[in-house]
Amino acid sequence: DVQLQASGEAWCRLGGSLTLSCVFSGFNFGDYVIGWLRQAPGKEREGVSCISSSDGSTYYADSVKGRFTISSDNAKNTVYLQMNSLKPEDTAVYYCAAAYYSGSYHYSVAEYDWWGQGTQVTVSS
């Protein structure tokens, strides 16, 4: 069975840092990209970042570029999202998900096939 399990700290103040982890199983990471997506209250779900193990490429939404870093530890089947300089507008439920690798630079929300449960991140001002 495919599983993605997201976890990480839940709260921090403006300007703080948090790290989210996504442990995955049941599929070959080489055939997929793993992404982090988020959904704030009243807003649509949006892609934040994704990483491919096939070519090592990464993608960042403009809103997080320079502040967030995605990485993977293939031996541990884990993808991380290091979030620095957090802002209140980063408050959202964060999801990790897997999309079939097509060579694209960016994947839409609809292209993600498997999802983990969300984890709430709250940034207080």
Image (cartoon, rainbow, N blue to C red):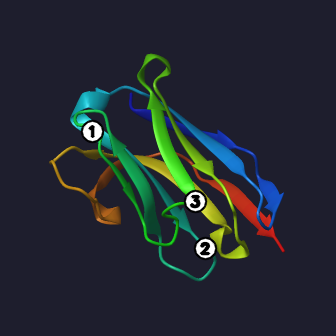
Residue 30 percent across, percent down from the top left: 25, 29
Question: In the displayed image of the protein, which residue is found farthest to the top?
Answer: 75
Residue 78 percent across, percent down from the top left: 50, 29
Task: Give me the residue at 50% from left, 72% from top.
Answer: 63
* Towards the viewer: 56 or 47: 56
Instruction: Identify residue for label 3.
Output: 67
Name above or below for residue 97 compared with residue 120: above
**Seen in the image, is 28 located left or right of residue 48?**
left
Residue 3 percent across, percent down from the top left: 46, 33
Residue 64 percent across, percent down from the top left: 52, 65
Q: Crowding at label 2, few (<14), some or many (≥20) Cα neighbours within 10 Å?
A: some
Kindly state the secondary structure of the residue where label 2 is placed: loop
What's the amino acid at mark 2?
Ala
* Mark earlier in primary sequence (2, 3): 2
Instruction: Identify residue for label 2.
Output: 40
Q: Crowding at label 3, few (<14), some or many (≥20) Cα neighbours within 10 Å?
A: some
Kindly state the secondary structure of the residue where label 1 is placed: strand
Name above or below for residue 56 compared with residue 60: above
Instruction: Identify residue for label 1.
Output: 32
